[in-house]
Image: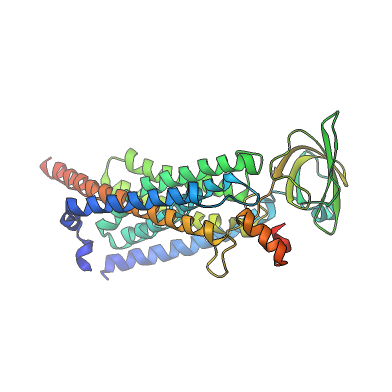
Amino acid sequence: MSPAAKKRTIYFLISIITFIIIARFVYVSLNANTVYFFSPTDLKNISEKPNGIIRVGGLVKKSSFAENKQKQIYSFVITDLNNDIYVEYKGLLPNLFQEEKGAIVEGKLKDKKFLIGNKILAKHDENYMPPEVADALKKSGKWNKKYD
Amino acid sequence: MFSLLQLKKIFQLGDNFFYWLKIIFLSIIIFGLILSLWVSPKDYLQGETVRIMYVHVPASWLALMIFSAMGLFSIITLIFKIRVFTLYAKSLAPIGFTFSLISVFTGSLWGQPTWGTFWTWDARLTSMLVLVFLYIFYILSWNVIKNFFTAEKISSIVAILGLANIPIIKFSVEWWNTLHQPASIKLTEAPAIHASMLTPLIIMFVGFAFFSLFIFLVRYKSEVLKLKEYNLKKSSK
């Protein structure tokens, strides 16, 4: 390596180290702020009720879904299997919205257990399979709970 | 091996080579599209929407890989001043940029029916958008700065700084709560995707990779010519 290249390498290594330190700070501060959604347990542990629009995510609790056909209001419970939060929502439901599936509700908290939703996002997981395979797995008893 | 470091080596690849490379990438992509659009089954939850994935995932992978390669080449450029690597990175940039755009647009087409929204500011989507802007900065710094050597320095710095974004994109779905699902294909585990869907995905990826190689070589050739022209103009002044 020529002396000039050596000098550049040293400069480069120093800047990389500085850069990693900066990236580390950014990562730590992002960790504190980049909460796309809260779980019901997170909300329970928060000391004061958050104002404005927040997102709450979890599973739609089994047999909690009900709809008021006349007013087109849906109500259901979002759960993380430890804590629940009651949701009321008026609007369209996404295709993948089902009981016992993941969903994220955007809206305002009325009180700590009750959310008025104005937008619903269905969460999709990383599992992909044809319908026949899903049926076969269910029949043979090999169905993993995480596919639900 | 050392001869690859010489700019003029590219001209040893004849028209025949480019012709066959074109045939290869076209046939792989056509075969992959037939598999993914007609032969492969629909998903048990998403239905037919799953077919968007066969374009979305390979495009995203390549957008990430190409930027990583550009960052690496830029490090070599800045330290060793070997001109081939500068031109490698410069010719790769528009390809990666196109793939990152394809990734974002197909992703939002998939997001609308599945999630219920075209766009949301979760960590994965935001960091991918940052990648699109990094590509734009990189390409702009070549286009705006007229002096070749200044442009080389600035664009390399952009690419190296941008490298930090790559792990953020990759691990965003594990580090934070995101709407985007985690990766289905991991090096350490069995894929969470059925074989009948994995095969077309891999074939599409190989087809896209060959396509990138083809465009890259064509672009690289013209970049070498442009550099020669630039040097001639400068020496004649």
Quadrant location of the N terminus of chain B?
bottom left
On screen, B110 above or below B4?
Answer: above
Residue at 71 percent of width and 63 percent of height: A139
Position in image of residue B33 (x %, y %): 44, 48
Number of dots carrying numbers? 0
The answer to whether any part of residue A97 appears in the image is yes
- Tell me which colouring the rendered structure shows: rainbow
Q: Left or right: where does residue B100 sit relative to residue A129?
A: left
Task: Name the quarter where the C terminus of chain B is drawn.
Answer: top left
Left/right placement of residue B109 relative to residue A95 reads left
- Residue A28 in view: no
- Quadrant hosting residue B169: bottom right
- Image-based side of A130 in relation to A97, left or right: left
**Residue B81: % across, % down:** 27, 59
Q: Residue at x 65, y 55 (%)?
A: A125
Left or right side of B87 for A75: right
Residue B118, quarter of the rendered image: top right
Residue B175: quarter of image: bottom right
Name the spot of residue B209 as percent of width and height, x first: 38, 55
Residue that protrudes farthest toward the top in the picture: A70
Q: Give the percent coordinates (x, y) of residue B200.
A: 47, 55
Q: Is residue A144 above or below residue B34?
A: below
